[in-house]
Image: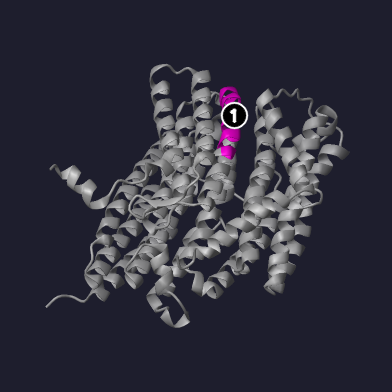
């Protein structure tokens, strides 16, 4: 017996919210970056689940685009973290913030 | 028969003739990449970039027949060609200010040039997307390139170390919030795909025909799409990255973000809303009305307390997102025409104000603080006069074109009887006088505090004078631009249900 697709949609929605919470509460900039990756990857689950429902493959093709873009974003993000760490020797959001209202 | 031949006979060859502007921009980017790699000749890099962009601009005008090509993934119509022409034009003006600024701050990298071209390519892909896949790729090519451009303030000068770090921080904040926006937009695309089974704007429109056809999945998709687009266009309450990223980036890059990237985002907002969701306009027009009202109120009130003029202009750009998206609250031909008209004239006002800052920041001791503007009219009368024109235009005082833009949005709102938003627009325009006129008053009514010597390049003077002339001429004679905007909005409406 196969699992209905709605379960996967709920799972992807939960992961999405989890990623959003991670961005809001975590203090370490690496964890914050990983949380955005979690949000992007939760979308992949939703696409594959909708393909189960629609019996198509277009969503799975879109997953490749999301993977590529997530990789590009992670590369730029890690580069920026390296640059920030070189200048400040710290990865704590509270301690490295200089731009304020 | 080889596999490639089979593919070509099965699918047909894409019509590359309508893709020439994009191809020229891409090839120019690679040529600049190799010039930077092998010769590091700065004059040659600038000349190649500008020559390539001029060629792309010419090729935009040479396309006489639009087409939907690349197997239905790419649309070339007069709407996208108009926006491409203006995007390329504004990029030419901005690139002309790159070299003197970067050399003065000792942050010159050839990467600035070809990354700008890649971001421009992303915007051009974005404005001519009839499909959520193309839209997503264009948007991300633009965003990720701009994250890099913001963080590239890498100087060897010890006194600028603070700016060096701030640019990394601004870039990282934009990366995280922009990444959330990307995730939200892709989730919206997933939900729209799940509800309709297609990525194509026209097919989505044919499935979402009335209120009854909207189920919970489609509704959630539309809401998330609006949130994601509002985040990319920096509408309140999703604006938190804007002031930090704009302040932290090198000023020519701020100009690129605040003008070219913004206008491309407005164009795609209009296209997605009108082409993909035309029959449910009552729902999204109200959502955009709320976002516009919040942007106008919050943007203008926070801009009032800013002492740093660059940061003030960042908040003013949030307020302008409010004025422009307010036109979407009236989903009529008049509203869309006002939207296109305001987006186009915003290019000239914003380039003027920000290139002014670029020109002055090159001089030692200039910090963009409001006190630096004191007595500028005595030290450099022409520049002060030009800034006065741009400030009046951003504020919307006739005979500058800013007045015509706001009048268009106002009339569209009255025409659709969205009275409350029209009232908010007028009151917030009046409040914005508080910070625009403060810049003018400190320039003209105070004695100079610091003794600074100013020097400007010919390109900066020429761009500022040209922008001021365009702002004034369009303010007196807006008919040409208004006719173009009206034509575009009627073409856009006619394409519904194609």
Residue matched to label 1: B96
From what the image shows, is residue B287 above or below residue B448?
Answer: below
From what the image shows, is residue B261 above or below residue A17?
Answer: above
User: Is residue B286 visible to the viewer in this orientation of the structure?
Assistant: yes
Task: Tally the numbered discs.
Answer: 1
Percent across and percent down for residue B3 are 15, 44
From what the image shows, is residue B184 above or below residue B161?
Answer: below
Q: Residue at x 75, y 38 (%)?
A: B469
Q: Residue at x 55, y 25 (%)?
A: B158
Percent across and percent down for residue B141 are 41, 45
From what the image shows, is residue B346 above or below residue B428?
Answer: above
Q: Quadrant of the C terminus of chain B?
A: bottom left
Q: Which residue is at the far bottom? A: B212
Q: Of helix, strand and loop, which one carries label 1?
A: loop
Mark 1 crowd level (few <14, some 14–19, many ≥20, 10 Å Cα): some
Percent across and percent down for residue B427 are 76, 64
Magenta part, dominant SS: helix
Left or right? Give the position of B48 relative to B70. Answer: right
Q: Quadrant of the N terminus of chain B?
A: top left
Indicate the chain on which mark 1 is placed.
B
- Determine if the magenta segment contains residue B96: yes
Question: What's the magenta region?
Answer: B89-105
Q: Residue at x 58, y 43 (%)?
A: B86
């Amino acid at each position: 017996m196969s699992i209905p697709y709605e379960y996967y949609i709920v799972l992807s929605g939960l992961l999405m919210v989890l990623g959003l919470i991670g961005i809001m509460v975590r203090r370490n900039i690496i964890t914050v970056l990983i949380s955005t990756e979690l949000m992007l990857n939760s979308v992949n689950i939703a696409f594959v689940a909708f393909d189960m429902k629609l019996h198509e493959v277009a969503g799975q093709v879109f997953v490749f685009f999301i993977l590529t873009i997530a990789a590009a974003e992670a590369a730029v993000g890690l580069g920026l973290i390296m640059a920030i760490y070189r200048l400040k020797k710290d990865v704590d959001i509270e301690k490295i913030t200089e731009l304020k209202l | 028969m080889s596999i490639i031949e089979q593919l070509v006979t099965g699918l047909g060859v894409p019509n590359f003739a309508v893709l020439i502007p994009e191809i020229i921009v891409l090839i120019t980017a690679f040529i600049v990449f190799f010039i930077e790699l092998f010769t590091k000749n700065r004059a040659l890099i600038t000349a190649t970039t500008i020559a390539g962009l001029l060629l792309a601009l010419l090729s935009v005008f040479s396309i006489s027949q639009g087409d939907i090509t690349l197997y239905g993934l790419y649309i070339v119509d007069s709407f996208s060609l108009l926006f491409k022409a203006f995007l390329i034009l504004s990029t030419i003006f901005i690139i002309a200010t790159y070299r003197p600024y970067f050399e003065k701050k000792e942050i010159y990298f050839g990467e600035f040039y070809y990354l700008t071209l890649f971001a421009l390519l992303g915007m051009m892909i974005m404005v001519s997307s009839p499909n959520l896949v193309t839209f997503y790729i264009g948007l991300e090519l633009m965003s990720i390139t701009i994250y890099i451009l913001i963080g590239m303030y890498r100087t060897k000068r010890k006194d600028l170390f603070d700016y060096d770090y701030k640019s990394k921080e601004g870039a990282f904040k934009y990366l995280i919030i922009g990444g959330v926006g990307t995730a939200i937009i892709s989730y919206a695309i997933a939900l729209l795909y799940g509800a309709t089974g297609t990525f194509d704007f026209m097919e989505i429109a044919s499935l979402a025909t009335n209120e009854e056809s909207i189920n919970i999945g489609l509704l959630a998709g539309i809401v998330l799409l609006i949130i994601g687009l509002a985040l990319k266009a920096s509408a309140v309450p999703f604006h938190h990255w804007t002031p930090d990223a704009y302040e932290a980036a090198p000023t020519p890059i701020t100009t690129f973000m605040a003008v070219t990237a913004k206008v491309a985002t407005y164009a795609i907002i209009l296209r997605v809303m009108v082409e993909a969701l035309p029959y449910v306009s009552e729902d999204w027009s109200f959502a955009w009305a709320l976002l516009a009202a919040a942007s106008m109120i919050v943007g203008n009130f926070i801009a009032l307390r800013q002492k740093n003029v660059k940061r003030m202009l960042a908040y003013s750009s949030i307020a302008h997102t409010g004025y422009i998206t307010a036109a979407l609250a009236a989903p009529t031909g008049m509203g869309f025409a006002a939207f296109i008209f305001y987006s186009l004239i915003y290019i000239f006002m914003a380039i003027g104000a920000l290139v002014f800052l670029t020109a002055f920041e090159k001089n030692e001791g200039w910090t963009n603080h409001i006190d630096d503007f004191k007595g500028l009219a005595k030290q450099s009368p022409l520049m002060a006069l030009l800034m006065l024109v741009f400030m009046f235009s951003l504020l919307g005082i006739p005979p500058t074109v800013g007045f015509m833009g706001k009048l268009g949005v106002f009339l569209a709102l009255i025409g659709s009887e969205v009275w409350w938003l029209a009232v908010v627009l007028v009151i917030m325009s009046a409040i914005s006088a508080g910070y625009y006129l403060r810049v003018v008053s400190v320039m003209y009514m105070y004695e100079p505090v610091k003794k600074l010597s100013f020097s400007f390049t010919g390109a900066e003077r020429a761009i500022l004078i040209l922008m001021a002339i365009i702002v004034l001429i369009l303010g007196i004679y807006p008919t040409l631009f208004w006719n173009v905007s009206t034509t575009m909005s009627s073409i856009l409406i006619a394409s519904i249900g194609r």
